[in-house]
Image (cartoon, grey):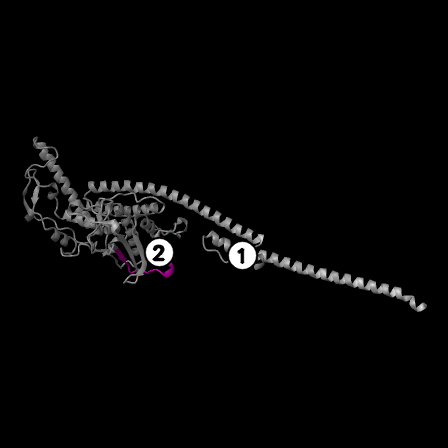
Amino acid sequence: MTDSVPSPVFWCLVAATIVLAALLIRVALTASARRRTIAELEAAVEARDTGLRHMVEARLPLLEQARPPAPKALDPRLEGTSYALSVHLIEETFAGAVSRARVRADQSAKAALKGAMRALQGLAHEQQLSISDMQERHDHPDVLGGLLEIDHANAQFGRRAQAIAVLCGSWPGRQRAASPLVDVARGAKSRIRDYRRVQVHAQVETAVVSRAVEPVVLAVAELLDNAARHSQPNTTVEVNIQPAHNGACIVIDDAGVGMNDQEIQQASRWLEGQTAVDINRLGDPPQFGFPVIGVLAERYGFRVSVDTRSPYGGVRAVLFLPKALLTHLTPDDGVGVVREVRGPSAAAPSPAPAASAPAPSAADIVGSTAGGLPKRRRRDAAATDAGASGGVTAGSDESTDTGGRSVHETASRMGAFARGTRSGRAAVQRVNGHDANTAAGSVPAGTEDPTDTTDTAAPEALHGDDQDKGITQR
């Protein structure tokens, strides 16, 4: 009887123990689950922080620079979540804002530069008119020599302003008649600082149509300036005008430092003209040359490439003109391109000036005109020009411009030409004053052309320096 008494208590204790064990197991399982959940949440938070840090430090700066962004660093567990979608939306919004801001900044900069360059082009044109007027009024060689240097500097200034204006969306601003390719190359040569180092060789007798003359001159000038600036001062820049199957080519070879693969790729992208040019990202100082050429090539239909090495170790630039931009001039057409300035341009005087033009001798005087002006026998133009240029004979290649004439000699010839022209006009006025029956502005019978009363070396000198200038005016 007494042995059966502890049984209920024992079983109660057993039941309580079982219940307590179950509760402990449940608490342990719950705590473990919570620890796993907390660990997962901490890992998710850490993954989000890492992804956000990667976006701020790596992806957004690349988007700001308009470069391909770095690969995404989001944890795979976050793919497809609302967080990943929010991050993607942030990147798209940021990229759009940067693009719009860049476009607005580029448009504002281009508008400001275009207005400034238009004003500068106007001032350069007014200055050119003043220089031309002074060249007509002054015949002293020293004065004319200084005017020639100012003239050449003004031509370079005008080219720079013109190139920047074109890059900003403006047009070249000049309309010229059709011109031979060799004159186009010489016109481009006259607009750079080191024009004496450029040698032009022509193998074709074709011309550029009117609407493309000024753009091609500007593009070739930028190529020549680039070639001269990146080569030694004692080297030459060779320009060869060659025929092609569907047009003509202007090939420019320099002996400069060349370009590496990255520079060639960047230049090719600019020269294609397909990508928008951000003038705020052209370097410091900005490099306008290739972008300007690309804009002109895309606008007018010619092509330019610089991806070939020249035989002299530098860069070979090739400007290809299709048949649509070429034409042929008849002898009656005259010279189709008008020079930018009337006076020949020149840079600093050469170290060794050439000999002055030979003065006319007494044997050349064959009589006098009705106004008392001496008549001179005409000299052979080729012989005169050969003696003035220091040994270049009439058989030399006319397409090669050596540029050997000094500024002082050029100024002397221009001064002689101007003095003779004024003397002839004065004589005509005196004759007209004595003869009431002579029509106004006409020359009496037996009177030679006023320009024939000048030193005969003057016309050849002016013509030769017009070739140095590039594009002649008639």
- Which of 53/124 is in front? 53
Q: Residue furthest top?
A: 436
Image coordinates for residue 199, horizontal then vertical, percent? 23, 56
Q: Residue furthest bottom?
A: 3
Type of amino acid under label 2: Ser
Type of amino acid under label 1: His
**Circle 2 is placed at which residue position?**
268
Q: Left or right of 1: which side holds 145?
A: left
Q: Left or right of 190: which side holds 275?
A: right
Q: Is residue 176 magenta?
A: no
Q: Residue furthest right?
A: 1
For residue 441, above or below residue 397: above
Image coordinates for residue 396, horizontal then vertical, percent? 16, 57
Q: Residue at x 41, y 46 (%)?
A: 106
**Circle 1 is placed at which residue position?**
54
Image coordinates for residue 420, horizontal then vertical, percent? 13, 42
Give SS at disc 2. Answer: helix
